[in-house]
Amino acid sequence: MDIWNRHFECMDRDELRRVQSERLIESVERAYFNVPYYRHKMQELGLGPESIRSIDDIVKLPFTTKQDLRDNYPFGLFAVPMSEIVRIHASSGTTGKPTVVGYTRNDISTWSEVMARTLTCAGASRNDFIQIAYGYGLFTGGLGLHYGGEKIGASVIPISGGNTLRQIQLMHDFGSTVLACTPSYALYLAEAIQDSGISRDEFKLRVGVFGAEPWTENMRREIEDKLKIKAIDIYGLSEVIGPGVASECLFQDGLHVNEDHFYPEIINPENLEVLPPGNHGELVFTTLTKEGLPLIRYRTRDLTRLNTEKCRCGRTLSRMDKCLGRSDDMLIIRGVNLFPSQVESTLLEIGDIKPHYQLIVDRVNNLDTLELKVEVDEAFLLDRISQLEALRKKIQDTMESSLGLGIKITLVEPRMIERSEGKSQRVIDKRKF
Ligand code: DLL
């Protein structure tokens, strides 16, 4: 099995700690001197750059959250002048404001490096055809995989997401060997291939690199059976870099975290205490080399645990378990991140409706569906059906343009949505994880 960067991926763990210490010191200095937000936060705790002498001191540093990025929208946490930024990505987030991330030329090169590791980890090489069916654009999936694919010298097919019949045609005609997309789209494609009547033997597909949303071992088995490939889990988030933060090797025994660039910690999300390896909790990352947007102890909200034992593949980087849950209420629907609060605030701006609603998430034919049930105002019920239809259409259009997602709107009579005495159940997620 090939390893892209044996030096860093198989480094002795004591040596790795020395590298992490050196890089943390530089990173904190960069943040302190170039980002007023970090400087103030550290000063409040009585910390200066000299307080950080090794990676062990990381626990002294304050946490950063998605809200901090939002409060400094769009570029407030960038640590370099805009003239140094060569790329901007953004992830959909809450009300109107996406989370914006910026990369310097060196950051793009780091990203290509970690993506080259990811693809090599999955067994891909210059001899492969990589069909990239992650979306290209502000989402980091498409371009992240793209740069990694080119870096390892593979033949990259930048088809982007959607257009399933064309995906199947090119996969067949070009002989794609590696498929990169979300796991739910992989399953959808698998069924569309079965329906196409083309025999599996006519495809050369061997492996898939799937991520951007949670998926279970059952789902992995289903994808592997239907597509007759090896399905590899890859993990990342835009704030940290995009895909390329961690990825499985062909042993499929945990995702190797690129710890020389992104330092992982597991904390108890309730009291924020750091937990020793092996414990379940919330994953936190500190970037060690990033220039454009250095992040200090960024709370991902993803729940997992870390294993520091060497893997059978030879890599010594710690491995994280598959991420299946989050410590907040963020939903991921067809790869788009969505907070229920976003739906609520959009809804309440519309008028003629009660603030009672329920979001129903499901998976039909392996694709996520989103339905919003909304109670209409009593006065409105006396009116004509055409008016109700106009209201439904108005909600649908407003939601779709605000969320960037297709959504089915169902209007219901007053008091039809169950009231709750405690925490209301705004979201019913019927997908099986
Ligand atoms: O989803 C980056 C990415 C693109 C990863 C392509 C892998 C492949 P965001 O849109 O910022 O970035 O969403 C990040 O998605 O905090 C997790 O909750 C979730 N996520 C990403 N990968 C996985 C995975 C990209 N393999 C958020 N398993 C993260 C479970 C994942 N959840």
Image (cartoon, rainbow, N blue to C red):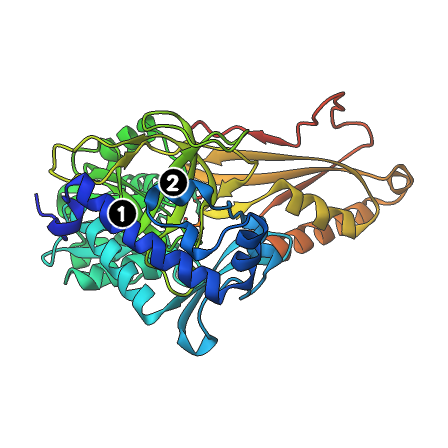
- Front residue of 202/120: it is 120
Q: Position of residue 273 (x, y in %)?
A: 47, 31
Q: Is residue 199 visible?
A: no
Q: Which residue is mark 2?
A: 184
Question: Label 1 sits on what residue type?
Answer: Asn
Q: Secondary structure at mark 1?
A: loop
Q: Nearer the viewer, residue 351 or 1?
A: 1
Q: Does residue 372 appear in the picture of this structure? A: yes
Ligand 1 occupies quarter: top left
Residue 26 in which image quadrant: bottom left
Q: Residues within 10 Å of mark 1 (few under 14, many from 20)?
A: many
Residue 388 in the image: state x and y as whole percent.
Answer: 79, 45
Q: Is residue 227 above or below residue 146?
A: above
Secondary structure at badge 2 equals helix
What residue is at 41 percent from the left and 65 percent from the top? 292
Q: Nearer the viewer, residue 97 or 232?
A: 97
| CB contact under 8 Å: marks 2 and 1 | no
